[in-house]
Amino acid sequence: MSAVPILPVRPPQLNHLGTLGARQLGCRRGRRLLFRGLTLRLDAGSITWLRGTNGSGKTSLMRILAGLSAPAEGEVTWNDRPIAGSAARQAIVYIGHANALKDDLTLTESVAFLARLHGVRDAARRALNALDQFGLGSRRDAPVRTLSQGQRRRGALARLALDEQPRTWILDEPYDALDQASVALLSDLIQAHAQRGGAVLLTSHQAVILAGATALDLEPWRAH
């Protein structure tokens, strides 16, 4: 994988909802401690590429930050205070390996449902436009269960195209199963989100170019 280009290009003023972080975070999988002592801040306008070997705890860390798992040690913070309450959680968008689309809904209905959970206005109409951007216009009324894995992935990522708020995006291998056009579109969405004051934490096995991104390697916090 090529190195992440570190280009300190930031807009002079950033509008943001808050800053997600962690203090002295530790993660355990079964009896095994994966990492400990991890401290981080996902500042407004930042794109952070999380790196580590398979099994190092990348997905576990993302799930902890998204509020889906509890840490073994330390705490997750919002604006440097222990995270609590639905307001902070609503400012975090997590897309993991599971695409979180409802099999019995149409693709449009499922994307609109995810958007409404975060207070996106006029979600149904805007979901149609987002699906068109990802080349899924012809599948908008198809039940999710009939879609290919690549179509489901693009459908889940289309939810990002609806976001106008500078939330914190946590994206676990978002480029998987995407064609070249969708890879370029997703990179544009990520960089536009950072420009409006959002923060992005992502993992990727693909060597994509994201201007302004910085790398965070889990190795220094690995438990040995």
Image: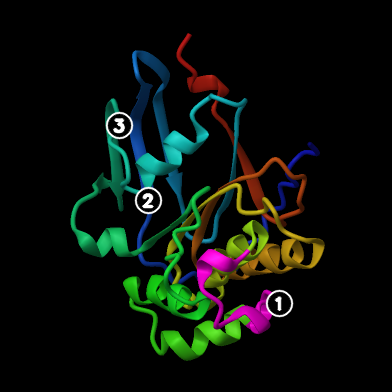
Q: CA distance from mark 2 to mark 1?
A: 32 Å
Q: Earlier in the sequence, mark 3 or mark 1?
A: 3
Residue 141's image quarter?
bottom right
Relative to 69, is 128 above or below? below
* Residue 90 included in the magenta stretch of the image: no
Q: Which mark is residue 20?
A: 2
At x 35%, y 60%, the residue is 18
Picture quarter with the N terminus:
top right
Which x, y percent locates residue 150? 67, 60
Which x, y percent locates residue 144? 52, 68
At x 67%, y 50%, the residue is 176
- Judging depth in this view, the residue of 206 and 78 nearest the camera is 206
How crowded is the residue under tag 1: few (<14 C-alpha within 10 Å), some, or many (20+)? some
Q: Which residue is mark 3?
A: 71
* Residue type beneath disc 1: Gly
Which element is circle 1 on? loop
Q: Which mark is residue 97?
A: none
For discs 2 and 1, the disc positioned in front in the rendered view: 1
Specify start and end residues of the magenta stretch as a single range.
132-147
Q: Is residue 50 left or right of residue 32?
A: right
Q: Is residue 30 left or right of residue 6?
A: left
Relative to 108, is 144 above or below? above
Q: Which residue is mark 1?
A: 135
- Judging depth in this view, the residue of 110 and 163 nearest the camera is 110
For discs 3 and 1, the disc positioned in front in the rendered view: 1
Q: Earlier in the sequence, mark 2 or mark 1?
A: 2
* Residue 136 included in the magenta stretch of the image: yes
Which x, y percent locates residue 25? 35, 29
* Residue type beneath disc 2: Leu
Which element is circle 3 on? loop
